[in-house]
Amino acid sequence: LRTDMLRFVAAAVLAVAAFASDEGEPQGAWLLSQKTFQSAYAVENMDYVVEYGLYNVGDRPATKISLDDRAGFPSQYFDIVRGVLQVSVERINPGENFTHAVVLKPLRAGQFNFSAAVVSYRPDENSKELRNGLTSAPGEVYIYIEREYQRRFASKAPTFFVYFVMMAVTTVFSYVALVQIDNKWKAFEKKSH
């Protein structure tokens, strides 16, 4: 998550620098696009949340925006639980943003290379030009086997509770046996004196 944020900040600084250096005629809409994972771990057969962010840093509204990430999540590797991987937005005004989330379920464990989503838009309401871009690409992510994830990251409280109960039974049994033996010994000492 930290590297994604650093990439986004670097892209924003570059975009601001590009606008500051060229003070000619208006540049139209410029979209910064970001793809981030909201889930801490990718786990086979568990929900995995992907969020897309589009930010208009230009001086005109972006229109007819299309975000497509179908190639990034093939159906043989992921099920879509909630949301869609291709979305269209009619307009994003200057200084505004648009976010979209998709809930996926990885079907296989192992390394997976997450690629960028494709973004296309018109830089002005009257423009025929179509600008294309890519979101940030998170890169390779390890998808855990569910059993391995449970072993490494799940709560250990039930295991410790069972351990405590087992130790309590043996400790209480040992204490009761010790008290009984002590009482018998004291009784034996009184008889022999």
Image (cartoon, helix red, strand yellow):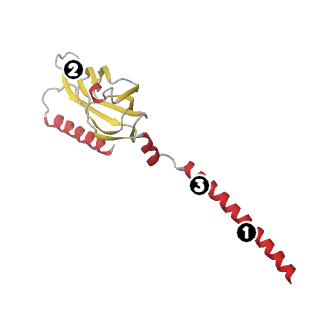
User: Residue 60's spot in the image, x, y percent?
Assistant: 23, 24
Q: Amino acid at mark 3?
A: Tyr
Res 20 visible:
yes
Amino acid residing under circle 2: Asp
Are the residues flagged by discs 3 and 1 in contact, CB closer than 8 Å?
no
Against 167, is 56 above or below?
A: above
Give percent across and percent down for residue 71: 26, 27
Q: Quadrant of the N terminus?
A: top left
Spatial CA span between label 3 and label 1:
22 Å
Tag 2 secondary structure: loop
Q: CA distance from mark 2 to mark 1?
A: 88 Å
Q: Position of residue 108 (x, y in %)?
A: 36, 35
Which badge, 3 or 1, is on the more N-terminal residue? 3
Label 1 sits on a secondary structure element that is: helix
Residue 100 seen from this side: no
Residue at label 2?
A: 124
- Tag of residue 163: 3
Q: Which mark is residue 178?
A: 1
Foreground: disc 2 or disc 1:
1
- In front: 60, or 47? 47
Q: Quadrant of residue 55?
A: top left
Residue at image point 20% right, 15% down: 126
Gap between marks 3 and 2 measured at Cα: 66 Å
Where residue 17 sits: x, y (%)?
Answer: 18, 39
Report the amino acid beneath label 1.
Leu
Q: Secondary structure at mark 3?
A: helix
Q: Quadrant of the C terminus?
A: bottom right
Q: Residues within 10 Å of mark 1 (few under 14, many from 20)?
A: few
**Image check: 129 left or right of 72?**
left
Would you identify the image quadrant in which residue 100 lies? Answer: top left
